[in-house]
Amino acid sequence: MNFVAEFRKFIARGNVLDLAIGVVIGAAFGKIVTSLTESIIMPLIGWVFGDVDFSNYFWRLGSVPEGYDGALTNYAELKEAGVAMIGYGEFLTQLVNFLIIAFALFMLLRTVNRVIDEVQELASETEESATTDAVTTDPQLDVLKKILAELRSDGGNKGGAAGGSAGGPAPAAS
């Protein structure tokens, strides 16, 4: 098998395609969260604290170079002029982004776990899951459960090598 054919086979697997779709959806979700944070949440926080622009929250560590005529409160201009600073406003914005994404993923995982628990509870309460639409299981599992129940009720003596050892012939009657 040549390299291209092997690569096509790898890409065509469901797991790789699912992962690719997840990455694309995650990137789009990240853009939505960034927009929500920068356009709605951070301005509200800034309004509450009296400053609308978190990007200009910084600590100046170095001196301003001679000849600098920009504002001493503008982070971008000071950074361009080469002033050493710690810009914690951007960090706060990214921290809020992270918390929003973490909370959304937590809520999604919590919902998925609840649905899985409900399905497992329904499956344990249902004798034949193949006849119940609420529980999605393999019908072969129900057949195996019936066979196991019959074997247990008959003591394992029905059909097969009754009275014999595993793999050996049954003892002859005298």
Image (cartoon, rainbow, N blue to C red):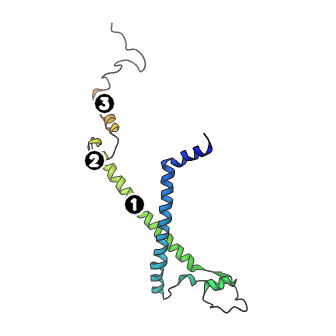
> Amino acid under label 1?
Arg
Q: Which type of secondary structure does the marked residue at label 3 adopt?
A: helix
Say few, some or many: other residues with alpha carbon within 10 Å of mark 1 (under 14 / 14 to 19 / 20 or more). Answer: few
Label 2: state its secondary structure.
Answer: loop
User: Residue beneath label 1, please?
Assistant: 110
Residue at label 2?
A: 133
Q: Quadrant of residue 111?
A: bottom left
Question: Residue 134: x and y, percent?
Answer: 28, 49
Foreground of the two, 25 or 119 = 25
Up-down relation of residue 134 to residue 111 (above or below) = above
Which quadrant is home to the N terminus? top right
Q: Is residue 101 above or below residue 83?
A: above
In terms of depth relative to the viewer, which is nearer, 169 or 34? 34
Q: Nearer the viewer, mark 3 or mark 2?
A: 2
Q: Earlier in the sequence, mark 3 or mark 2?
A: 2
Write down the residue under mark 3.
Answer: 152
Estimate the x, y position of residue 160 in percent, counting from the top left: 34, 21
- Neighbourhood count class around disc 3 (C-alpha, 10 Å): few under 14, some 14–19, many 20 upward: few
